[in-house]
Amino acid sequence: MSIKKENLLETAENLFYKHGFRGVGLKQIIKEANVATMTLYNHFNSKEQLVEEVLKKRELRYWSYLDAFVDSNTDSPFIAVVEAHCKWLKQYSYKGDMFMRAIEDYTGTDNNIENIARGHKEKLLHYFEELAKTKNLENWKDAAIQFTLLLEGTTSMTTLIGSEEATKYSIAMAQMLVSSAS
C-alpha cells in the first residue's frame, strides 16, 4: 500500500471516529492528510469506498490485536479476549463503536458499508463459537452469545462509565461466565 493511501486511510479513520461519518467531508480529509484531490480519487472512487476501506483496515487491526492476546493465553482464552477487547476500547474505541456508527449511518443505503459493519459483529459471534467448541463447551452456542453480548455491552458502557470501570466489571462477568460454562 502506498504511503499516501495509508495516510488517507489513517486520517479518514481518525476524523470519522472523532466527528462521525456524516460529519466529515472529503475536503476535510484531503486538507488534513495534506494531499491533492486527485490523490484521493486515484485511491478511492467515492467517500463510501473510503469508508469501506477504513472499516476493513480497522477490523484487521482489531482481530490482530485480539489474536495476539489469545495466542499468549491459551489457559483462559475467554478472559484473554475480554481483556484484549477492553484494552482495545481504552486505546482505540473510547468514544464508542465505529462499526455500530456505520450501521446506524448507512443502513439501507446503496453501498457495502452496512454489510462490512454487520459482518464484523457476526465475526465476533463466530469467533466465540469456535473458541467455545475448541474448549469443548457443551453449551458452546449459549457461551458464544453471552460473551458477544458481554463485549458489546462493554463497548457501550465505556462511553458511559469509562474504560477502567467497564473493564473491571467485564472481567468479573467473564470470570462468572467461564465458571458457569465449565
Image: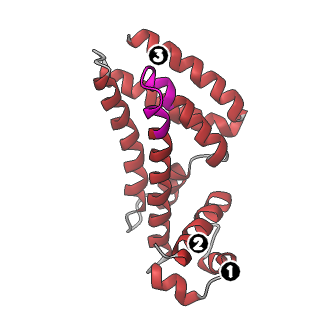
Dot 2: element: helix
Apparent side of residue 148 relative to residue 16 in the rendered image (left or right):
left
Three-letter code, disc 1: Lys
Nearer-N-terminus badge (3/1): 1
**Residues rendered magenta in the picture:** 68-81
Distance from the alpha carbon under mark 2 to that under mark 3: 41 Å
Query: Residue at left 58%, top 22%?
Result: 171
The image position of residue 15, as x and y in percent, is 65, 65
Local packing at callout 3 (Cα closer than 10 Å; few below 14, some 14-19, many 20+) is: some
**Residue marked by disc 1:** 31
* Contact between labelled residues 3 and 2, with CB atoms less than 8 Å apart: no
Where disc 3 sits, the SS reads: helix
How far apart are the alpha carbons under marks 3 and 1?
Answer: 48 Å
At label 2, the amino acid type is Asn
Horizontal and vertical percent for residue 36?
A: 60, 88
Q: Position of residue 78 (x, y in %)?
A: 45, 25
The figure's colour scheme reads secondary structure
